[in-house]
Image: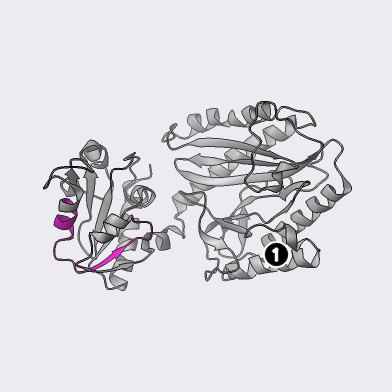
Amino acid sequence: MFDAIEYQQRLQRLQVLIKKAELDAFVVRSDTNVMYLTGVDYYSAERKVLMIIPAQGEPQLIVPRMEQERLGRAASVTQENVLSYWEMDAKPGRGWRERFEESLGSAQRVGIEPFADADTVAALKDRDWQVLPLVEDIRVIKSPVEIALTRRVAGYWTSAMNAILTEASVGRSVAELMQTGQRIMTDIFANEPAANHSNSTAYMLLSCSPQSSSPHYFSTSQDDTLPDGATVINSMGCVNWYRAENERTILTGNYTAQQAELFDIAQQGQQLALDLIKPDVPCAEVDSAVQDFFVKQGVAEHMRHRAGHGFGMEGHERPYTSEGSEETYQPNMLISVEPGLYVEGVGGFRHCDTLLITENGTENFTLGTPKDRASLTF
């Protein structure tokens, strides 16, 4: 997807961390991390793909036979270092364990990522192994090409959101509004040569009150329409696996004074977070400040989650803007900012922006959609 040098640089950064941890080798198991390090899209289902990275020297891939040619195109692994096995239930000598032992060789101090499955960990029983999030440690700081792509992704979702807002009115079909936003895929496929129906998907999700008091409730019935009250609209998805979000709460028809008040408090809580976020500020400090604000506003019982999370190849990844986080914001992190309030029988209230941490502050990639109540009342 990116130039080969991007993946080679990722591998080099990882090997620096492997050496720093005094490991002989590191095992990558999750498909997302393998794709991050190789630049190859693949679908292995239950079949394992393992990447073995030595502290120095060439990495190796252990792949099912059916994916050998595809993963042989990896930007950071030479074809002769792609080792194949037959199937998960292969005969002795033809399975992944034999290739795994072959690849690890004499390595004794081995690191393995946190998302590895139990049988992969069990295969290390005769070695000195430890769980370390080394790939996540490098993924948390984005490269220039990742930032440029995410800026475009956020731009697509902003265009989709703005299209939906031009159609919003009480009684309007949710299904029709979702289709209005989905049309952005035409632009994505026209402008992103590497995009396909596997690595690029748009989700236009509407959560109508009062059921939107559950943060992950979505109005998906063919008969759903915009109510008198609040609706949370989320324009999101991935382009070439990279994700962003543009989310807004709107008020339609005969909404109540309570809904207007909750809208304003939720917006103020998000703005507080936006104002606080900058390099070297602890993530926990921002989440705690938002919680304190909601407590002072008398709505503490209506909080349900942290103030945000990181973006990248996954929708939720580090850093987490959460009270227990030990991380600080650093330049070139990409995050969501999305504190919310949820009142049973009334609805949910949440805006979400996609933010880049810069050297001196932040850049808001979704600033092109308004957030004030006057602009979002229909």
- Residue 288 found in image quarter: bottom right
For image coordinates 19% across by 54% down, the residue present is 100
Is label 1 in a helix, a strand or a loop? helix
Q: Quadrant of residue 217?
A: top right
224 or 33: nearer the viewer? 224
Residue sticking out furthest to the left: 93
Residue shown at the point (50%, 36%) measured from the top left = 201
In percent of width and height, residue 8 lies at 30, 54
Q: Is residue 372 above or below residue 199?
A: below
Q: Quadrant of the N terminus?
A: top left
Looking at the picture, which amino acid does disc 1 mark? Val
Residue 128 placement: quadrant: bottom left
Where does the image place residue 89, in percent across and percent down from the top left? 21, 42
Query: Is residue 68 toward the left or the right of residue 284 in the image?
Result: left
Any magenta on residue 365? no
| Residue at the image point whose x is 63% and y is 64% from the top | 277
Say whether residue 332 is visible. Answer: no
- Horizontal arrangement in the rendering, residue 62 relative to residue 310 (left or right): left
Q: Is residue 298 visible?
A: yes
Q: Residue at x 30, y 60 (%)?
A: 12
Q: Nearer the viewer, residue 6 or 329?
A: 329
Image vertical order of residue 258 relative to residue 133, above or below:
above
What is the count of numbered marks?
Answer: 1
Name the residue that disc number 1 marks.
Answer: 290
Quarter of the figure with the C terminus: top right
- Residue 261, image x and y in percent? 84, 53
- Please provide the residue range marked out in magenta: 99-116
- The x and y percentages for residue 207 are 68, 40
**Nearer-the-camera pick, 105 or 38:** 105
Closer to us: 184 or 213? 213
Q: Is residue 110 magenta?
A: yes
